[in-house]
Amino acid sequence: MEAELLRLAASVATTVAGTIGTDAYTAFKARVGALFRRGRQERADSFLSELEERRNDLALARDRGDEARVAELVPEVEELLRSELRRLLEEQPSLAGELRDLHTEVRNVVTNGTVVVGGHTHVSNVYNHYYDGGPPAPRQALPSMSAPLPRIALWPMDHYENNASLLRRMDAVWARGQAAGIAATMYMQGVPGSGTSAVAREWLRLHQEELTGPQLEASLGRDPWGNLPEPSAILERWFRELGIPAGDVPADPGERSTYFRRLAARGQIVVLLEDVAVASQVEPLLPGTPGSVALITSHSRLPQLVRTVGAEPFEMEPLGRVHSRKLLVNVGRIRGDATAYEKELDLIADGCGDLPLALCIAGAQLALGHTGRVRELAAELSDRTTRLEALNMDDEISAALDPVYRGLAPDAAHLYRCIGLHPAGKFEPDVVRAMLPDMDTTARNKALRQLTAANLIEPAEDGGYRVRHHLIHDHALACARADEPAEAREAVLDRIIAHYLEFAERAEAALSSRYRHDPAGTYAAYAPMGSVDVPGVIASLERRRESLENVVRLAHEKGRHDQTWRLAQGLHSFYLKCGLHSPWITTHELALTSAHECRDQLAIARMYFELGFAHLDRWSTRQGDPQIARGYFEHALELVRPADGGATEGQRRTESSALEGLGMLERKLGNPALALECYALGLAALNGIDHERGRALFALHRGVACTDLRRHDEAARELLSAREQFANLPVPDPYNEARALTRYAEDRRAAERPGEAVRALDDAIEIMTVNGPPYQRAGILLLRGDLLSTQGDHARARLDWVTASDLFREANSLRAQEADQRLAGASGAGDEDGSQGVDDE
């Protein structure tokens, strides 16, 4: 190859590698892919899959601030690009011009910071990483785009039959609700297999153009362990799907339900509640607002739904014979021969009881069977001694999937079995690599492509994969149990658990510098070396949340007790930052049991503390959280106060944490003096221990308690000291620095010194404008607007309230109404006193 082309390949590789783990790469990803696909297709697909895998690794490392890992990965990515570019230019030298253009554009982004592609602005955050050796530049947010509304999945129903009359009756109920300005609540009841879910989704499909608002769904059936889901936990998930700030979500179940209805009042909303077992599950999940639609399905007769929530009942009847026969013909692929089998088809329909599910199972057997299978199946279903076996769903699924599985190449079949052992149907490429460490990237990607082509898995929107149906996942597990030796299965499970444990602990280290019980020394190794993209880490955890939570249960059930409590500990900060109290409590209850099995006293104490903090943070008096939290904190203290007084550093840190929790609990209960006593003891437990952030937090807590006690001079000293301590940490904490200033402003307002309060909020806003999310900035602006209004500065107050309203809306918070109410109340006052409006300022 000519020297000039070699230099071009090297230059393009270096420049693209510099952007590949950042936002800027988004602008060029499709173009890079198109260039490489100009070569051999299979080779290009394999290379691009490997590049995407390395890109994911690099993005995760950068999100966590793991600069050492970034430094390892960038040269690997660059060498991968360089070698492939050389090959491409050897085969097609005419592409040199396109590569030069690409190189110029990417270099401009790195130098200038932004690029506009279509309607999107992409921001480069790579210049400081790779060109001047300084700390990474703060990530700037991309222009806000409206988040996609949650929608209910409407799978294709090519063979849907009958229920036209029922669908028309449902239309009538919806029309009456719209005319009367009330919610439409419809309840479909029938025996298993009668098609309750199918008819609900068919109605949604028919009206998908009209139902333009958010759509939420939940299964209310029992889980594999026999537990019913808590409505409060379902609402918690729905709030996340709707993008509601965690700070807005009430703790008490009743208040959550009320808040959900307030959200629903903003516009049309649809909820689908399936497999309802108990009527009391339903009411907290109903929007109940004009224009909303609630569809309920159940295999039980629940007259309470009609009496208590006014649901319109619909009973699913068996299909008519004409429709049963048509369903058998379509699913069984026997259209041309249907007239020759009319008697047999009637016998099969009789044996199926004209139930849609049974008819589909029978039809699938006909589609896969030999030409004489129609008569055989008719005979089997006519005999009650063989009828149940003939309709056994597991056998039918196996009969459909076994040929597909047996036709897979060995690597793809091995991956399929590993996916069956994975505790969730959705998975990321990194867990595939963890499950199959001896399979190279090319072979893994080829196996993934074969499973995708066989319709066993499909790509997910966020870059991962998901099994196409839970029955396929069950079949994969059955294949693993049948075809993998027990020792091999256990080895795969060990690798899955170890992978998620490392992921959780790396993410936890990135999200918080708090103390963790760490006998393996992993957190010291995972400590971030640079700035952390907290939203990126949380998004990665959210994508893997189902897997992580299922792995906690898997590790517990398999007796991997040390890994169980470590996994739960690694999810603490994620749950705290996202307000996910239900899974937080569930996982940590398992972790506490596992810690007891390990007989590790400090692990037990830490799990008591973390469970106490979960209940403290949720603070639902109706669910007894104050009493439960107190009990857990006190249990933790009992374990870390040895009789001889020779507490270890870990015991003293845990003692301090539990006392901090008890102090916060007392303050919430209206006992600030008792809170100060707990804080004093907690601070004393840290004597001689290097824990600057802990001392800063105690200063913040003490300042707030002093404000409650009207000891304003003392409160001011503590809060200003906390602000200074947070700013001077080895890794400064601007969020808590602004929080301390906000608390100081609240104290100054209580001390009737509004001028000092406003100046403190000016500083807090300046800090949060760079580092703070919209929700927190809006809260500070709302407070500053109130203070400015009391001082008579109505123009600046209105400006703050307008900005707060916009930021609350950006954060999807109903608190925007608070700012709007202030603006409405002040609209006449400004004109009367001659002050100027916001538009005139």
Image: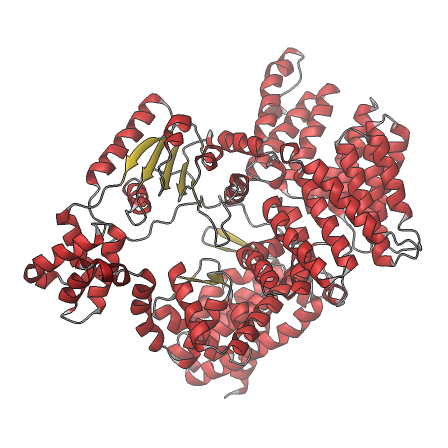
Quadrant in the rendering for residue 621:
top right
State which quarter of the image contains the C terminus.
top right
Looking at the image, residue 327 sits to the left or right of residue 555; the answer is left
Spot occupied by residue 421 in the image (x, y as percentages of width and height)? 49, 68
Q: Nearer the viewer, residue 674 or 460?
A: 674
Residue 675 vs residue 742, the one in the foreground: 675
Looking at the picture, how far across and down is residue 455, in whole percent?
34, 66
- In this rendering, is residue 66 above or below 574? below
Nearer to me, 197 or 31? 197
The residue sitting at 49% across, 69% down in the picture is 101
Residue for point 59% across, 40% down: 245
Q: Is residue 410 left or right of residue 804?
A: left
Asked whether residue 110 appears in the rendered view, the answer is yes
The answer to whether residue 103 is visible is: no
Figure colour scheme: secondary structure
List the single residue furthest toward the bottom: 1
The answer to whether residue 370 is above or below residue 757 is below
- Which residue of the protein is positioned furthest toward the left in this rendering? 340
Residue that lies at the very extreme toward the top in this rendered image: 832
Residue 282, position as x, y percentages in the image = 45, 36
Locate residue 490, reporting x and y percent.
55, 73
How many marks do you count on the picture? Answer: 0
Q: Is residue 731 above or below residue 811?
A: below
30 lies above or below 353: below
Asked if residue 620 lies left or right of residue 631, the reply is: left
